[in-house]
Structure formats: structure tokens, C-alpha cells
Amino acid sequence: MSSILPPARRIWWKEPVEKLEVWWILIALAWALILFFMMPYWHVFGKQNLAHAAVKTSAQAYLAKANEMVEKYKVREETEQKIPVVRPPADSDVYLVARLWSWWPILELEAGKTYKVHLMSMDWLHGFSLQPENINIQVHPGYDHVLTVTPTRAGTYSIICNEYCGVNHHTMATRLYVK
């Protein structure tokens, strides 16, 4: 039988399978099963994926909580747009708002302390990418995504949008300070 010419007998599925082909099918099946069982294993034991919850909410309710947090914990303003920098206490809820081409506010967290970070988009689908830690989450409008984070190293981190959100997508970046 040739792969170029049609088979002499049209009922090709009744042809005997060659021994080498059976071995390749078994190898592919074994590899697929290994990968299938490794995914839940690494999720549970590998600590590579963030466990986060998403709760349906309205933009007005979420924005009210974010404004309340900014009023309470604002320490200064940065950039030309005068974006507030907030320093919330440990074990508190921290709200980060994504809207066309900006993140609001800038967060200043303390190393070794745990925070509940809430993410929500006010308009389109955005992506939350914390670099260089390589944490990536899709931020949907109408959903409050809640992450429990404990920063371990002090420094300045970048938060960028990694889901194309329009003509100024490349400008949707901010900082996260860990003291």
C-alpha cells in the first residue's frame, strides 16, 4: 500500500496494521496518558497555577469598593495622569481596576504579608500579567477575580495587559511596588 496511490482494496480498515505502526500508536497513547495525568498533578502539587475565584458583580459596586480603598490608603500620586498609589494593610482586600488602556490604582504591598487582590475590567477583556513572576489571568468585565497573594521579594514589578484591547493596548502598563 502507498500513501500516494489509493489502496487496491477500497476497504482499507480491514487491512492488517503493520507492527511498527502499532508501536507508534502505543507510544503516542502512552505519552498522551502521561501528559493527561501530569496536568492535574502539577496543578495540585506543582504550585504552578494560581487558584482564584471569580464572582459576578456590577461595575458600579466594584468601583465603589475600589474608590473607598483609594480614599483610605492613598499615600501619594504618580505619573502625569496623577494615578494614586495605595498602601493597604496586610490581610486586606486590594482592588485593581482595568479599563481601556490603564490600570488603577498603583499598589504598594509589603513583602511577607498576605493580601486578597481583586481584579475587574470596566469595559473589555483585559489580561493581568505580573512580570517577571509570569502570573497571567484573564480579567473579564462583570466579574471580580480574587487572588490571595503573599509577595516574597521586595522590588518594583510590572503589570501589563496581555490581551489585545484596542489601539493603545501597548500603553496599558503599571507598576506594583513591594517594600
Image (tube, grey):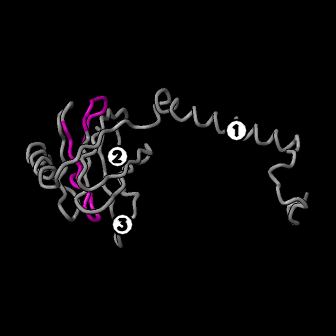
Tally the marks: 3
- Disc on the earlier residue, 3 or 1: 1
Mark carried by residue 73: none
The x, y position of residue 150, in whole percent, is 32, 32
**Magenta range:** 93-116
- In this rendering, is residue 57 above or below 165? above
Q: Are marks 1 and 2 in contact (CB under 8 Å)?
A: no
Q: Are marks 2 and 3 in contact (CB under 8 Å)?
A: no
Secondary element at image label 3: helix
Q: Which residue is mark 3?
A: 169
**How far across and down, in percent of the image, does residue 169 sit?**
36, 66
The residue under label 2 is which amino acid type? Thr
The tag earlier along the polypeptide, 1 or 2, is 1
Quarter of the image for residue 31 reads top right
Q: For the N terminus, which image quadrant?
A: bottom right
Q: Residues within 10 Å of mark 1 (few under 14, many from 20)?
A: few
User: Judging from the image, what secondary structure is the residue with disc 1 in?
Assistant: helix
Residue at coordinates 12% horizontally, 43% vertically from top-left? Answer: 73
Q: Main secondary structure of the magenta part?
A: strand
Q: Amino acid at mark 1?
A: Leu
Above-or-below relation of 101 to 117: below
Q: 42 or 91, which lies in front?
A: 42
Return the residue at label 1: 29
Q: Residues within 10 Å of mark 2 (few under 14, many from 20)?
A: some
Query: Can you give x and y, in whole percent of width and height, for residue 27 in the image?
Result: 75, 38
The quadrant in which residue 16 appears is top right
- Determine the CA span between mark 3 and mark 1: 42 Å
Label 1 or label 2, whichever lies nearer to me, is 1
